[in-house]
Image (spheres, grey):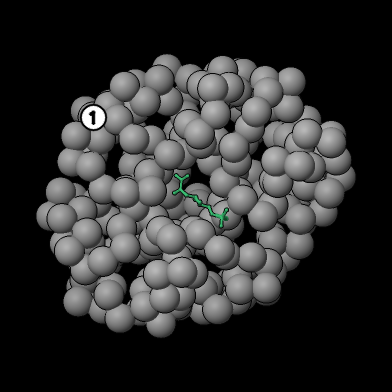
Amino acid sequence: MSDAFAEIAKIGVVPVIAIESIDHAVPLADALLEGGLGVAEITFRTEAAADVMALLSDKRPELLLGAGTVLNPDQVKRAVSAGAAFALAPGFDPAVVEAAEAASLPFAPGIMTPSDISLATARGCRLMKFFPATPAGGPSMLKNISAPFAHLQAKFIPTGGVTLDTIADWLSLPEIAAVGGTWIAKAEDMRAGDWQAIAAKARAAVARARELRP
Ligand SMILES: O=C(O)C(=O)C[C@H](O)[C@H](O)COP(=O)(O)O
């Protein structure tokens, strides 16, 4: 596993962020860091994503910066030029895996079925996003679909419906590297400039992860 992914597994929580304005970038990063959360997945769900990553890799290099919702090879390139240290996607697209490999960008594709895991592991992936984790069946679903791949040391980041209250259900499984989700940095908190709320949610998530993985 890459250094970036090993670090994510150590932290145990990845905030998934759809950031609407470049003006939110530094205050958001500072809120996460103040909460003790040194990682962020900036998703390509918004226009601002690439500029936000470029700004943060310059101004807040201490934050482990990843690109999320990477849906095509062009976004892999944009993530790399913006200084992202890793990338994730909601689904599995071999063209994206290939582009990430060519760019030496650690990449975790999304999976939801044994077939997805089969395709992704055959393509060399060992860390995968389990999306949408909660509606797809929660921890017991992941436990079952990942069992045949355990000998490959496949690990997962569940996202989709994960909250502070369900972190424990996930992190107690050995095949989980970390949990992810948008509950830490909500769009409405960023819009309202409520950075303290984000710092508090980051702090609570980190504390919960540490309780489970001291
Ligand atoms: O955007 C991506 O690349 C994704 O893979 C999906 C996100 O991680 C989930 O949509 C987060 O889900 P919530 O925490 O329930 O809001």
Q: Is residue 167 above or below residue 189?
A: below
Q: In which quarter of the image is the C terminus?
A: bottom right
- Badge count: 1
Q: Nearer the viewer, residue 127 or 166?
A: 166
The verdict on label 1 being within 8 Å of ligand 1 is: no
Q: Is residue 63 visible?
A: yes
Residue 70 lies, in percent from the top left, at: 38, 35
Secondary structure of the residue carrying numbered label 1: helix
The single residue placed furthest to the left in the displayed view is 122
| Residue at (43% x, 39% y) in the render | 69
Residue 118 lies, in percent from the top left, at: 16, 62
Residue 31 lies, in percent from the top left, at: 78, 40
Residue 88 lies, in percent from the top left, at: 40, 43
- 199 displayed left or right of 185: right
Q: Is residue 22 above or below residue 126?
A: above
Query: What residue would you read off at disc 1?
Result: 99
| Residue at (54% x, 29% y) in the render | 46
**Quadrant of residue 99 in the image?**
top left
**Quadrant of residue 166 in the image?**
bottom right
Q: Is residue 41 above or below residue 47?
A: below
Q: What kind of residue is marked 1?
A: Ala
